[in-house]
Amino acid sequence: MKRWLALLMAMMMAVSIMACSAQGGSGNAQVSANAAANAKKVLLIRKKEGGGDPFLINHLKKQGYQVMDIVDADFTLEKAKGYGVIYVSESINSSKIDSKLKSSTVPLVVAKNQVASEVGLVGAQQFGQNEGVRTVHILDGKHPLAAGLKDTVAIYKEDGKISYGLHPGKEAVTIAEYPASGDNKKIMIFGYEKGSKNINNEAVLARQVYFSMPTGEEEKLTDNGWKLFDAAIDWAAANGAK
């Protein structure tokens, strides 16, 4: 009788453990599913009117992203919850952006120079713009942010404007520079991996990317220019996932 009771208790414990494991696995699967769903959601911060932001929104939607645009004056970090990427348009007024943006746990893709400086992607006043540009030079063709491109790449169909950061932090991955001469100073695409240190030696809480996309230049982009843009959004959205 005692042996039978002991066997029965052992069987009940085994069933209980299996049930807990199944529940935990289901919970982990749900977390993964939610993360994957959020990764396809972009919160685009724009100025109130004008600019090329509608062009970007349409492009992102064609790439399978759900896009919600919000005016710079209305943005708060709280409103970014549940999104996979925050895109900061070059069109915005940087003084209206929530000062806590640099503490965002949502990945960032930043096209606004002043915001890039405030967040810590690049140092104070260490940025600029150039006109009459068609090509850039890929520095790290093996990184996903390079979209499989290498050497000199035409990003515009005709002369256009680019933005750049000067000397990003030492833990940044530098992808593309201007001019296409190898001087490695004017970097128009670079990023920080989650957990790395930014220019201010602060830990980056989620992937952050600086991407040159001056407002009004969107329609000039070549297919390779769009590949680089898509790679920036996709890499940020993955946020370190394998």
Image (tube, rainbow, N blue to C red):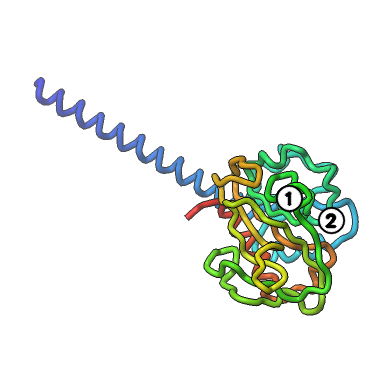
Can residue 69 be spotted in the picture? no
Element assignment for label 2? loop
Q: Position of residue 126 (x, y in %)?
A: 75, 53
From the viewer's perspective, is 225 left or right of 25? right
Q: Nearer the viewer, mark 1 or mark 2?
A: 1
Q: Can you say whether 208 is above or below 145 in the image?
A: above
Residue sitting at x 58%, y 45%: 197
Q: Quarter of the image containing the N terminus?
A: top left
Q: Position of residue 209 (x, y in %)?
A: 65, 55
Name the residue rendered at 69%, 41% in the picture.
102
Reading the image, the residue beneath label 2 is 91
- Name the amino acid type tagged 1: Ala
Q: Quadrant of residue 74?
A: top right
Query: What percent of the width, then of the height, locates residue 75?
Result: 79, 42
Q: Which residue is mark 1?
A: 116
- SS at mark 1 in the image: helix
- x and y percent of residue 206 in the render? 60, 46
At horizontal 79% and vertical 65% (from top left) the residue drawn is 55
Question: Where 15 sits versus 145, above or below?
Answer: above
Which residue is at the front of the view, 85 or 37? 85
**What residue is drawn where x is 85% and y is 66%?**
216
